[in-house]
Image (cartoon, rainbow, N blue to C red):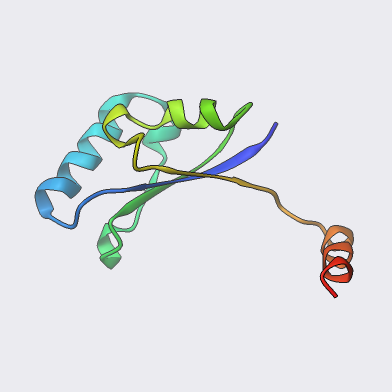
Amino acid sequence: MPRYLIEVPHKNTKKECDLAIKVFRETGSHFITHADFGCPDNVHKAWLNINVHDREDARRVVPRPYRESAKIIRVKRLNTNKVERLLKHHK
């Protein structure tokens, strides 16, 4: 199953940080309750790594108020052989 990194930004205010955390916590989804937030380091985004069938499934995991601004990125871990092939391809 494909893996996606979801990046969800919010505005840099205490009110918006508190709201984002509240919305994520109250959503109830296992994915959402395990989001990582960058607010303590002044990066006002949350990140999720999830395995779902497709990009639209990934977007549906994001709470409605943040869906439009969320970045959905398909990611794949490369093993040593894949890295070598990729490097040869780019030469």
Q: Quadrant of residue 60?
A: top left
Determine whether, in the image, residue 23 is placed left or right of residue 69. left
x and y percentages locating residue 84 in the rendered image: 87, 67
x and y percentages locating residue 41 in the rendered image: 29, 67
x and y percentages locating residue 25 in the rendered image: 28, 33
Tell me the quarter of the image containing the N terminus. Answer: top right
Residue at 24 percent across and 33 percent down: it is 23
Farthest-out residue, bottom:
91
x and y percentages locating residue 30 in the rendered image: 44, 28
Tell me the quarter of the image containing the C terminus. Answer: bottom right
Residues 69 and 1: in front is 69
Q: Quadrant of residue 88?
A: bottom right
Residue at 26 percent across and 32 percent down: it is 65
Residues 25 and 82: in front is 82
Determine whether, in the image, residue 13 is placed left or right of residue 9. left
Residue at 67 percent across and 36 percent down: it is 2
Farthest-out residue, left:
15
Determine whether, in the image, residue 42 is placed left or right of residue 4. left
